[in-house]
Image: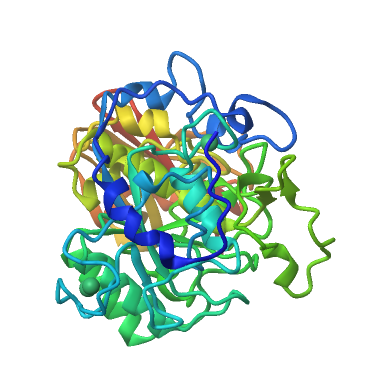
Amino acid sequence: MRYRDLPASFRCLPILAVFASFSAQVLALDPPADPLFTKTGNESQWHLPAVGLDAGAKSGWRTVRKAEPVTVAVIDSGLDWNHRDFDWNNLWHNDGEIADNGIDDDGNGYVDDMIGYNFIGHNNKPWDHDGHGTFVAGLIAGSWNSEGIAGINPAARIMVLKALNSFGHTRASYIAEAITYAVDNGARIINISVGGEGLISMQKKAVDYAVSKGALIIIAAGNEGKELAGFGIAALPEVITVGASDHDNRRVAFSNFGPEVDLLAPGIDIVSLRARYTDTLRDIPDTPYQPSSAYVGGDRRYYMAGGTSFSAPIVTGIASLLLSHDPSLSAADLKRMLLNSARDIETPGRDNLSGAGLVDAQAALLASPAFFVDAMISGVTVEQGSDGPMVKVLGTADADQLASIRVEMGAGEKPESFSKGSAPISDSVVDGVVGTIPAASFAGSGVWVLRLVVEHRNGTVREARFRLQLG
Ligand SMILES: [Ca+2]
Ligand SMILES: [Ca+2]
Ligand SMILES: [Ca+2]
Ligand SMILES: [Ca+2]
């Protein structure tokens, strides 16, 4: 056992250069043996089997044959890099920088930035005084060392970008600056488990820059139980916005919702690393919390908490695993693979509570990068046709290998069966008419549910539903 019980000191960081040179690629992943993963029940890492990362023969991890290192930026409250369950080989290392010489050797605008940067203190020591960032980093890259927790990707290299102070506060400009730093310094994936309402142009520009450079941003939906419209970066279509699911694979009531939500991942009773001297939940206002009651483990170096903040890094870890498996994948490939392989939950098809559904690492790792099926109804219009009024169903019905598109109809709020609506078509529709039904067909009920069914040539069926109120 290797203890690094050192006070929060940056003096140990020059040693990182030595450690980082050991960062050989990981070959073939067998599931980890870390006790908080292998145990079940209370205070276990139940979120891993819930997303297809278990110890079984079909575990997502077993699909990864050659895990290449992947740089993952974590924009958060920093990192306790002395935690013995976080290996320095899982830290990003700035190869162009010479430590502690007071010179910006690589000319990136930041002096002595060896593992990231502290945008709050404007220095090169992104130490975590809050605990939130260490928890997030542990979910992505916690050490596979047969003790404590297991992170999702042992080949992830965390770039530590501190943009959240000890009270969980940040500024939009810090987030924007951190995104730009991450992109300029080679991060392929950026996790943002902080947010709030409003979007400043600097943030939008930073997100556009990340997209233009092929970096994928994964962000927490937020915990207000509110509609996401207007919630800063999380409401932008370019990112992956992640809400929280519970033990029954349902959306948790606090998880923000709306069409902006892309995926859910577990977000309650999540166990990860506890940064030294921190008790993250203690500083959150209006939360009944008994100090130190979230500590886990005999040595209290682990922590249990909930929130979409911890759902996002689960998706980030899985996205990074896809990249470790195949570094040639683009950000668009990753998003397509994650969304199209998700387990459909809540209402059938994409919905406002769970987006594409619950993230599934196993299915995502087996998915073809080209594979997609889209089904979406945006509304209806009524137009006069030669045989009387016609209801035109508007939306998108598309797939990389499309078999057929049809719209069905069922009477009432919760139809028990659906009957034929429009004639099937076999050409893709993007923001157009997906089906046309004679208005006379809607006799007999004031409320109907329209069901758009899109079938892929491999047999996958995706549907979307739309409530139609007549009169
Ligand atoms: Ca530098
Ligand atoms: Ca330097
Ligand atoms: Ca461990
Ligand atoms: Ca659904």
Q: Quadrant of the C terminus?
A: bottom right
Q: Is 268 situated left or right of 324 in this image?
A: right
Along the viewing direction, whichever of 429 and 199 lies nearer the viewer = 199
Is residue 465 among the parts visible in the rendering? no
Along the viewing direction, whichever of 352 and 395 lies nearer the viewer = 352
Along the viewing direction, whichever of 39 and 307 lies nearer the viewer = 39
Q: Say if 411 sits above or below 30 in the image.
A: below
At a point 23% along the width and 52% down the height, the residue shown is 331
Q: Say if 274 sits above or below 175 in the image.
A: above
Q: How is the image coloured?
A: rainbow
Q: Is 23 situated left or right of 58 in this image?
A: left
At a point 24% along the width and 61% down the height, the residue shown is 94
At a point 69% along the width and 49% down the height, the residue shown is 304
Image coordinates of residue 458 in percent, x first then y, are 26, 23
Q: Say if 330 sits above or below 324 in the image.
A: below
Dividing the image into four quarters, tell me where ligand 2 lies.
bottom left
Q: Say if 251 sits above or below 325 in the image.
A: below
Q: Is 125 situated left or right of 106 in this image?
A: right
Image coordinates of residue 351 in percent, x first then y, are 50, 51
